[in-house]
Image (cartoon, rainbow, N blue to C red):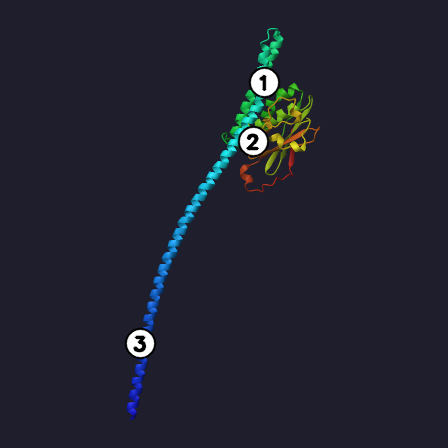
Amino acid sequence: MYPHTAVFLLCAALIICIAALCLCILYNNVQWQKLENILQDFQKQEYRSIMKQELLETRESKISALLRQILNTACFKEAHAIEEKDHVMELVSDLSHQLKTPLANIVMDMELLQNDSLTEEQRREFLLHTKSQADKMQWLMEDLLKASKLENGIIHFETKHTGIKQTIAAAVSSVYAQALAKQIDIITGEFTDFPLDHNPKWTAEALTNILENAIKYSPEKSRINILINRLDIYSEIMITDQGPGITPNEYNRIFKRFYRGHAAENQEGCGLGLYLAQLIAQCEKGYITVSSRPGQGSCFHIFLLNNKRLCKHKNTKRNIISSKVRIY
């Protein structure tokens, strides 16, 4: 074989190998393209399936969430309706119980007044007693209506940053005649006034209720002291009497509606005064507590905010260390 023939055959074989390699590459590319197309079609179908499933799940989840929301709203409304019903039933029960005694007394007085043998003095006494029972019913209805409006937010009063001295003076002035009738000294006097966040009219009513309670249960010729305790967040008004005192298990009960302890059995009243006082204090973002020892009198602590805006930036824990201002 000639040398140039061998070279030619070698070149031809090389060309054939290159051509075969190119064909293989081209074939592989075509196959890969087909495979990619198949994969893309599969992915598209899978994506559609997944999207369809997700859409279905999304719809189901939205419907489920909506149903849960409707169910929760229905449960809340049902619970609220039951609570309102219980509240109304309790109110009606308490009211009927409180009205039963004065109504019975009025009926009895009217029957006795029909007796022709009564003297003018006796008739006058029965009429005065009837009026007192009617007044009691009126006070009860007014206080109960007031308490109900405060509980349900119907009465909404604004507090203002103003001095407490005039508010205390108004409360003391409103009970002066009652204290004088029992020769009870309410020790008040000059002190440096300072502003608190409160509503003067409503705060004076709360203080009046506590003072009336103190006068009612204090013995004749006793004394009621008022102290002011200036704290960090709150200021404390303390009203101390020399009455029979309150047992520890009654500390929370006395602020409940219509509650009357053992000491109240022989006293006029309906058990709404302290309840209203606590409601008013709470509406002003304050509160009332009591400390007492049986036989040694009681002290009511009325806490009112110094400044509502400043208290948002301070620790809400009460700082008991304070400067005391005594009212003489």
| Disc ID at residue 23 | 3
Residue beneath label 2, please? 279
**Mark 2: amino acid:** Leu
| Disc ID at residue 93 | none
Q: Is residue 186 visible?
A: no
**Residue 165: horizontal and vertical position, in percent?**
59, 29
Answer with mark 2 or mark 1, whichever residue precedes in sequence.
1
Asked where in the image residue 142 lies, by quadrant, the reply is top right
Q: CA distance from mark 3 to mark 2?
A: 96 Å
Residue at (34% x, 69% y) in the render:
32
* Pointer 2 local density, CA inside 10 Å: few below 14, some 14–19, many at least 20: some
Asked where in the image residue 240 lies, by quadrant, the reply is top right
Image height of 116 relative to 228, above or below: above
Pick whichever, 42 or 319, lies toward us. Answer: 42
Residue at (54% x, 37% y) in the render:
308
Residue beneath label 1, please? 104
Image height of 135 relative to 152, above or below: above
Direction right: furthest residue: 295
Q: Choose mark 3 or mark 2, whichever is in front.
A: 3
The reply to whether the C-beta atoms of the residues labelled 2 and 1 are less than 8 Å apart is no
**Mark 3: amino acid:** Leu
Pick whichever, 253 or 150, lies toward us. Answer: 253
**Mark 1: amino acid:** Ala
Total number of numbered discs in the rendering: 3
> Which quarter of the rendering shows the N terminus?
bottom left
Q: CA distance from mark 2 to mark 1?
A: 30 Å
**Residue 39: horizontal and vertical position, in percent?**
36, 64
Pick whichever, 214 or 153, lies toward us. Answer: 153
